[in-house]
Amino acid sequence: MTDCIFCKIVDKQIPAGVVYEDDEMLCFKDIHPSAPVHLLLIPKVHFDSLAHARPEHEALLGKMMMKVPEIAAEAGLTNGFKTLINTGKGGGQEVFHLHVHIMGRPV
Ligand code: AMP
Ligand code: ZN
């Protein structure tokens, strides 16, 4: 059993405001938003951070990056958005399952 909170969201053991899901990734609303739209995009497979990504994650990371603008536009961020990946304790990471913050203000 994993204690990872984001794995539990993937497994539907913990509810989340899911805005996008496919076989490989999940996007849901940040529980403590720091922008009017604040989403987290995660891979369904667990790895701790960008610093823990392995070669087999390369295609998945590419797919996630390609999905970001689509999710942002769907959330109303048609004028632009911010993305953030905190990595490691020194990078401000608090949840150790890789995630991309997608933040912005709808126009
Ligand atoms: P980071 O500092 O990059 O690790 O960000 C972790 C983010 O996860 C924070 O913005 C939290 O508000 C968010 N978060 C933590 N638990 C949950 C949860 N159960 N559902 C949605 N977002 C969460
Ligand atoms: Zn996890």
Image (cartoon, grey):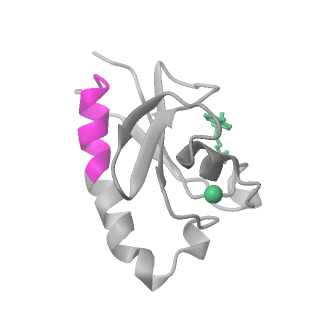
- Magenta residue check for 70: yes
Point out the stretch of residues depicted in magenta: 67-77
The percent coordinates of residue 45 (x first, y second) are: 51, 64
Q: How many marks?
A: 0
Q: Quadrant of ligand 2?
A: bottom right
The percent coordinates of residue 102 (x first, y second) are: 43, 38
Task: Report if residue 5 is visible in the image.
Answer: yes
The percent coordinates of residue 40 (x first, y second) are: 50, 41
Q: Is residue 76 above or below residue 100?
A: above
Say which residue appears at 64% left-offset and 40% top-offset: 13
Q: Is residue 49 left or right of residue 35?
A: right
Say which residue appears at 54% left-offset and 48% top-offset: 10
Say which residue appears at 36% left-offset and 67% top-offset: 60
Considering the image in quadrants, where does the C terminus appear?
Answer: top left
Task: Report if residue 80 is visible in the image.
Answer: no
Say which residue appears at 31% left-offset and 65% top-offset: 62
Q: Is residue 21 left or right of residue 101?
A: left
Quarter-of-image position of residue 24: bottom left
- Magenta residue check for 17: no
